[in-house]
Image: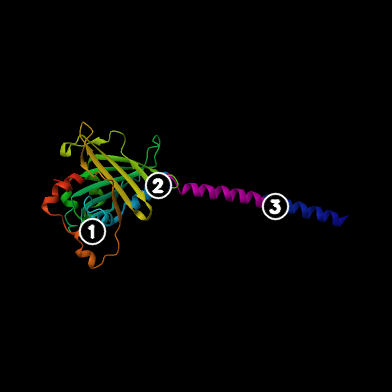
Amino acid sequence: MGTGDSDSESNGWNRARGLALKTLLLIGGALLVKRLRKSTTRWDHAHFVSNSLTGEKYSKEQASRDPDNYFNIRMLTCPAAELVDGSKVLYFEQAFWRTPQKPFRQRLFMVKPCPKELKCDVELSTYAIRDMEEYKNFCDRPRDQRPQPEEVIGDIAEHLTTVHLKRCPRGKRCLYEGSTPPGGFPNSWNGATYCTSELAILKNNEIHTWDRGYDDGGNQVWGQKEGPYEFKPAPTSSFNDMFSPLNFPPPPSMERRIEGSFVLQE
């Protein structure tokens, strides 16, 4: 009889221990799911996009495939400031490969999660800069020789465009893609009344951008017509690359074509 009581106690203890183990597993699973969900919060999407935009990228491969319509452009982006709400401010410039010290386009990007009422993941807004000359080659300079975060925030000028990005469905090449809202944003360059922007972020930090301007009649008056510019992270440079015709500034006769491709700064 004593043995039966002992077996009964042992079985009860085993059951209790089994229930406790199941409970721990359930709690652990719930914490794991919570942690996994936490890894894809709205801010994580914004940080991913911000990191993907950052760095030195070139359109060299595209220019090599289609030199009649695309130039070898250097796109350089780096962190410049952070707002109190966590929004990242990035400095962005574009220049011809051979003249990186003379950017023809300078902007400030603001990257943050989309407002909850919109069906998107990341909001990317573009702003003009109050004193563009002061920001030339911002990313190439030592941190103590360029405008500091407080100055950058104070130099955010006119709002130009906003692109709403969504995660791409499975099966597509992109990771995130988006565009400006229907109707675009006001723009007066070269006879335009409004402009549109499209952006796609691909694997390996490849960026596709397509900016276009239209007049009242819906006619395109600036920007690429064939498709977006494709920027890939800077490859390891070689001596031969220095003398590639893709890397030299275009002759004066091609300046008008360039103006049709980009909104040049005054």
Residue ranking furthest to the top: 217
Name the secondary structure under disc 3: helix
Q: Nearer the viewer, mark 3 or mark 2?
A: 2
Numbered badge on residue 45: 2
The residue stretch that appears in magenta: 20-41
Which residue does the numbered mark 3 point to in the structure image? 18
Q: Earlier in the sequence, mark 2 or mark 1?
A: 2
Tell me the amino acid under the disc marked 1: Asp
The residue that appears at 74% across and 53% down in the rendered structure is 13
Gap between marks 2 and 1, in whole Å?
27 Å
Amino acid at the residue labelled 3: Gly
Give the mark nearer the N terminus: 3 vs 2: 3
Residue placed under numbered mark 1 in the picture: 140
Few, some or many residues within 10 Å of mark 1 (<14, 14–19, 20+): some
- Depth order, front residue of 163/132: 163
The residue type indicated by label 2 comes to: His
Cα separation between marks 3 and 2: 40 Å
